[in-house]
Image: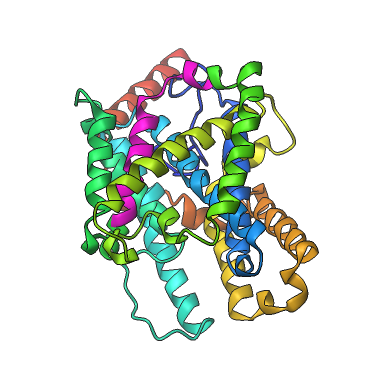
Amino acid sequence: MPAPRTPTGAQERQPPAGRPGAQRDAFFDNVKYLAIVLVAAGHSWAPLKSDSRVLEGLYNVVYTFHMPAFIIISGYFSRSFDMRPDRLKRLVTGLAVPYLLFQTAYLLFRRYVGHSSEPFDLVSPWYLTWFLCALFIWRLTSPLWKLVRRPLPIALGIAMLGSVSPGTGGALDLGRVLQFLPCFVLGLCLKPEHFAALRRGWVRIASLPVLAAALAVGWWTAPRLDDNWFYRESSAQSLGAHWWAGPLMTLALFACSLLLTAVFFAWVPGRRTWFTALGAGTLYGYLLHGFVVKFATYRGWFDRGWLHGPLGEILVTALAGAVVTLLCTKPVQRVFRFAMEPRMEWAFKQDAARLARERRQEERQMVSA
């Protein structure tokens, strides 16, 4: 998924052999596109699921793994991140600046389109912007995780502490930053052979009963389990549970996320498909589709009775997939590149070493000419 420049992979070079800078791998672009379709579908189901136990169960299953899948891929492509100036620059232009722009845009949209009186707060991510904020923090910590001896157990311990800390849900959405941290650290630890192993034929066959069991469990838990557990943003106490339920749910959700993400990866095609190229624009689809969903919510479009049946739910799902697909296309990328991938050369000092190399290269070309 994301490289140091863009969190959802607008510019990263994806290595089939795990080497940063190698040619893009179709598998990872396919993963990103299919995952963003699931994200958009999940957001479109939220206003409808209260009237359908089947849809609510499917919602719980999808929310168990769709963001963990994104975050694992984000961690995988953050393995080469260090504090080199050019990578810090791309971190700022690819995550920090888009966060500020879209946080501002979403808050203005909420106030003037949604007629909300909630305060204008740039440090408390709203709706979709939490992912940019979290990825900025996770990526900054990448060098540290490569130093410690047992990174994943430590990350799980931090996530469990986050699940019993009621004060982590405000500024910077630290609840999600801490509770999703193990997924990012797991991505840092993965190697190309791990993804290759998941795409074997017997793994795909074995994943079918796992998926069937997950759907059955999702249907059973739909009326019994608070959806907020799947968002990983609140503490156990905030959800009305005992404190010890937080660490237990953290471990259980991580295990379920890992299992269902493996099932998802097993069925993602590794060859180029019609949607492979769209995987490079998933940041655009992710950040822009939220305006469409919120606009429909504010206008009461989801309140129409005929949408709260099987045919209506299928139609809404198809429309959500079509909209997010459109928002991942090249024309949309060209229009919104100023916000997603700003260059901002004016804001940074020039790299003296790079300028010297370019000057020497120009001198050689002049001499050879």
Query: Residue 286: within the magenta?
Result: no
Residue 96 x %, y %: 34, 53
| Front residue (pair 236, 190) | 236
Query: Image height check: is 22 above or below 86?
Result: above
Place residue 326 in its image quadrant: bottom right
Residue 301 x %, y %: 68, 77
**Magenta-highlighted stretch: main secondary structure?**
helix
Which residue is at the far right?
311
Which residue does the image show at 64% across and 17% down from the upper left?
A: 202
Query: Image height check: is 27 above or below 318?
Result: above
- From the viewer's perspective, tell me whether residue 239 is left or right of residue 2: left
For the record, the magenta segment spans 175-195
Count of picture labels:
0
Which residue does the image show at 65% across and 58% down from the upper left?
A: 55
Query: Image height check: is 69 above or below 331?
Result: above
Which residue does the image show at 28% across and 56% down from the upper left?
A: 174
Which residue does the image show at 52% across and 57% down from the upper left?
A: 287
Query: Residue 178: within the magenta?
Result: yes
Residue 338 x %, y %: 49, 56
Can see residue 335? no
